[in-house]
Image (tube, grey):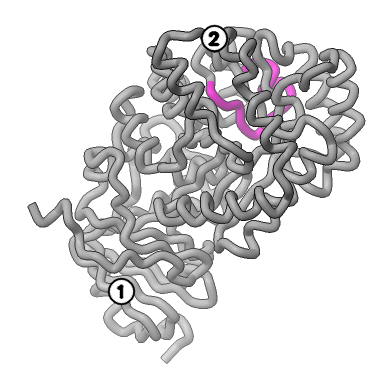
Amino acid sequence: MSSKNNVDILITNASELLTCKPFDPKKPKTGEDLKDLVIIKDGALGIKDGRIAFIGTSTDAKNITAKTTINAARKVVMPGFVDCHTHAVFAGSREDEFLKKQQGIPYLEILKQGGGILNTVEKTRRASKEELLQKSEKIFWKMLEYGTTTVEVKSGYGLSFEDEKKILEVAQDVTKKVPIDIIRTYLGAHTVPKNTSKENYVKEVISSLEKIKKYAEYCDVFCEKGVFSVGETETILTAAKKHGFKLKLHAEQNNQLHSAELAAKLGVVSADHLEYISPDGIKSMVDKGVIGVLLPGVPFYLMEEKYAPVRELINNGMAIAIASDFNPGSCPSYNMQLMISLACLKMKLLPSEAINATTINAAFAIDRGNEIGSLEEGKKADVIVLEVDNHNKLPYYFGINLVEKVIKNGKVVIDRGKSSIVDKH
């Protein structure tokens, strides 16, 4: 019997096996292709040495022997979620601000009272590396439980070289404790720290780039009115590119500043938020192949009505991804299943479009589309099993954790071991 017929794990009888396979292995899905999950009915998946060794129907798999067999009857099998935009390493919480928002107190007033990003900066600076690591370990285990197998983590709650480095080091160290892959992004330009002029802080961020490079793959800037202008953003990211960083950009979240056009000019991998993107911004990003990362949890949590114009983006040929933007201020949730529900309910995405946007397209948004995000032979075996029998039930049961099993790098790391509750009724 060939080595291909001997695997470590064999999943069989999947009601739907969502491969999320891209039609061009070098590009994310766009347009009509975003609707196609490339589903195998009665699917089977073989895993060997941490990689996908076989994919096909259960009938095709009848001659395969395995050390472990998982019966996925009446269940969906799909790639693990790729959360390609988070701020997941921080200290403290901001539930007091949640109450103030409920009482109608404006954000600028909350800032004057010592709230907002600088609130988290103060707490994160005070926290030791060990304290941050302990909190982060719990968070990333929870992410795994909800099906996220790869996550991008931005710094930005330190606003000094040593504190930013501390955050990025924790993001690396936590992978020794939690079986999850973390992509690190330097977001020193998140806001301006207290008692510092913006002009001096921009210079400080630029001067830190060479030293911080070994701790992060990407550099990002929060380009927003009252934070960093388009010109300041271009200056920082141009310098970052010279130091070998890949680029990301917080763009067009609260105002139309034409930062999407800047994203295209600089050739960033992704521009994120895009609630106020202009038609010219859309065209520029599409022309340059910039991925638009949309974050539906943010306007939902902030009780805003403005969401990114997703149908306009798709119809014009933009590749879109969906992420959580997990952070303590504007989206304290790492539940990617919930983000899929919100993308469907608030942005009118089809379930299939939202699933592709949180898997294969999200993988391309962190330049990992050749390794993760789809179930294909040779790719990393990052697989989740859901307690539902078809993919449309994923957004339908909003806020519920439907993940039964999580397989990361070919090993079962989460096994809730319960039969489906929702499908019994």
Tag of residue 139: none
Q: Residue 161 appears in which quarter of the rendering? A: top right
Q: Which of 395 and 10 is in front in this view?
A: 395
Q: Residue at x 64, y 30 (%)?
A: 120
Image location (x, y in percent) of residue 141:
49, 56
Q: In this view, does 92 lie to the left or right of 66?
A: right
The 10 Å Cα crowd at callout 1, few under 14, some 14 to 19, many 20 or more, is some
Query: For numbered disc 1, what is the local secondary structure?
Result: strand
Q: Mark 1 points at which residue?
A: 70
Span of residues in magenta: 260-273
Name the residue furthest bottom: 1
Q: Residue at x 57, y 38 (%)?
A: 86
Can residue 371 be spotted in the picture? no
Q: Do the residues labelled 2 and 1 touch (CB within 8 Å)?
A: no
Image location (x, y in percent) of residue 19:
38, 55
- Asked whether residue 224 is drawn in magenta, I would say no
Tag of residue 278: 2
Q: What type is the residue that disc 2 sits on?
A: Ser
Q: Taking 32 as reference, is 421 above or below it?
A: below
Image location (x, y in percent) of residue 189:
75, 25
Query: For numbered disc 2, what is the local secondary structure?
Result: loop
Q: Which of 91 and 183 is in front in this view?
A: 91
Q: What type is the residue that disc 1 sits on?
A: Ile
